Amino acid sequence: MDKVKLGLAVVMGLAGVVGFYVLRDSPMVIRVVSLLLGFALAVTVAMFTTQGRRLFAFSKDSIDETKKVVWPTRKETLQMAGVVFAFVMAMAIFLWLVDAGLMMIVRNVMDQEG
């Protein structure tokens, strides 16, 4: 029975998309309402399937877990951004020096003037 409900949900979602394009001569509001109505009906039907209930429970648990996250303060964020910036600058200088050194070695080996 779940497969039939999921199939019906897909058909309703597609009907919303088809309605959006079929009503191309109608005002945009009607086209968007058609699209949203199709998706809303598809989600409603899908919620009555086992997979839909599991997806809803997973989404609810994800939101609950997001609320438990301890976000860094502004000061911590700026400090970490400073550390990252300093590291990037140090690596850029290091790689530039390595590149310049290798270029000098290659020029000397090839006996070319800079």
Image (cartoon, grey):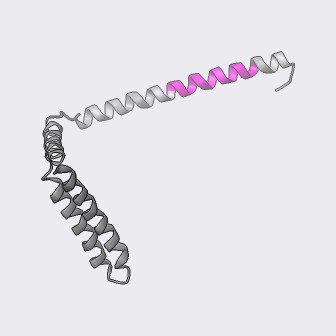
Indicate yes or no whether the magenta region holds residue 30: no
The quarter of the picture where residue 43 lies is: bottom left
Residue 55 location, x and y as percent? 18, 44
Give the residue drawn at x 12%, y 39%: 64
The quarter of the picture where residue 16 lies is: bottom left
Q: Is residue 92 left or right of residue 2?
A: right
Residue 3 location, x and y as percent? 22, 51
Q: In this view, does 53 lie above or below 40?
A: above
Tell me the quarter of the image containing the C terminus: top right
Q: How many marks?
A: 0
Q: Determine the main secondary structure of the stretch shown in magenta.
A: helix
Q: Give the range drawn in magenta.
A: 90-104
Name the residue nearer the viewer: 95 or 24: 24
Give the residue drawn at x 14%, y 35%: 68
Residue 74 location, x and y as percent? 25, 37
Q: In this view, does 18 lie above or below 112?
A: below
Give the residue drawn at x 16%, y 51%: 1
Q: Is residue 90 left or right of residue 30?
A: right
Name the residue nearer the viewer: 56 or 46: 46
Name the residue nearer the viewer: 102 or 11: 11
Residue 14 location, x and y as percent? 31, 64
Indicate yes or no whether the magenta region holds residue 91: yes
The quarter of the picture where residue 65 lies is: top left
